[in-house]
Image (cartoon, rainbow, N blue to C red):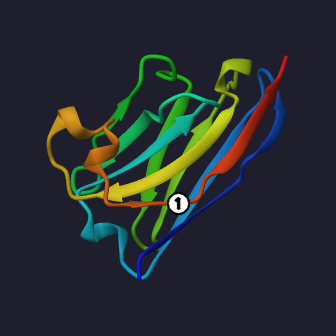
């Protein structure tokens, strides 16, 4: 059974940093074509913020987080990470990691492009 567990969320002041981690169990990260981070505001649809092709390591970012967030993978540890620096109040959301088999760029930030999801970790940024 594949399970994803996020950690590292919490409260931080604007301008600070957070590192989110996602541990994959029941499978290995190298089995998947893509891994990604999504976030969801209350009452809103889940949106993709960062994604990585596991084979090439090529990364993609939403415009709202470009140059501030860095996605990375560690196949040896079966983990996916998201470094957020500097954070802004508008980054306040629930963050989810996901893994999948999609290889199409248009699917990188689509929920349908991912097969397995974590339960989420809350990030709260105060001004």
Q: Is residue 113 left or right of residue 7?
A: left
- Count of marks overlaid on the render: 1
Question: Would you identify the image quadrant in which residue 18 lies?
Answer: top right
Position in image of residue 72 (x %, y %)? 45, 49
Position in image of residue 2 (x %, y %)? 41, 76
Q: Residue at x 40, y 47 (%)?
A: 36
Viewport quadrant of the C terminus: top right
Q: Nearer the viewer, residue 1 or 54?
A: 1
The secondary structure type at the circle numbered 1 is loop
Position in image of residue 52 (x %, y %)? 33, 45
Q: Residue at x 29, y 58 (%)?
A: 100
Q: Is residue 113 left or right of residue 27?
A: left
Position in image of residue 13 (x %, y %)? 85, 27
Does residue 53 lie above or below 68 as drawn?
Answer: below
Does residue 81 lie above or below 60 as drawn?
Answer: below
Does residue 79 lie above or below 25 as drawn?
Answer: above
Q: Is residue 44 left or right of residue 49?
A: right
Q: Residue at x 36, y 75 (%)?
A: 28
Q: Which residue is outermost to the left?
A: 104
Q: Which residue is outermost to the front?
A: 43
Viewport quadrant of the N terminus: bottom left
Q: Residue at x 49, y 52 (%)?
A: 97
Q: Is residue 38 left or right of residue 40?
A: left
> Where does label 1 land, which residue?
118
Question: Would you identify the image quadrant in which residue 26 lies?
Answer: bottom left
Does residue 65 lie above or below 48 as drawn?
Answer: above
**Disc 1 packing (10 Å; few <14; some 14–19; many ≥20):** many
């Amino acid at each position: 059974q594949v399970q994803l567990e996020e950690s590292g969320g919490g409260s931080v002041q604007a301008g600070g940093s957070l590192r989110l981690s996602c541990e994959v169990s029941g499978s290995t990260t190298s089995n998947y074509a893509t891994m990604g981070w999504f976030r969801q505001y209350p009452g809103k649809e889940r949106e993709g913020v960062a994604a990585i092709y596991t084979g090439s390591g090529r990364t993609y970012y939403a415009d709202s987080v470009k140059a501030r967030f860095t996605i990375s993978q560690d196949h040896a540890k079966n983990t996916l990470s998201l470094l957020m620096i500097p954070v802004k109040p508008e980054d306040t959301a629930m963050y989810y990691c996901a893994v999948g088999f999609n290889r199409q760029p248009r699917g990188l930030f689509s929920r349908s492009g991912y097969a397995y999801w974590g339960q989420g970790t809350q990030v709260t940024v105060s001004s």
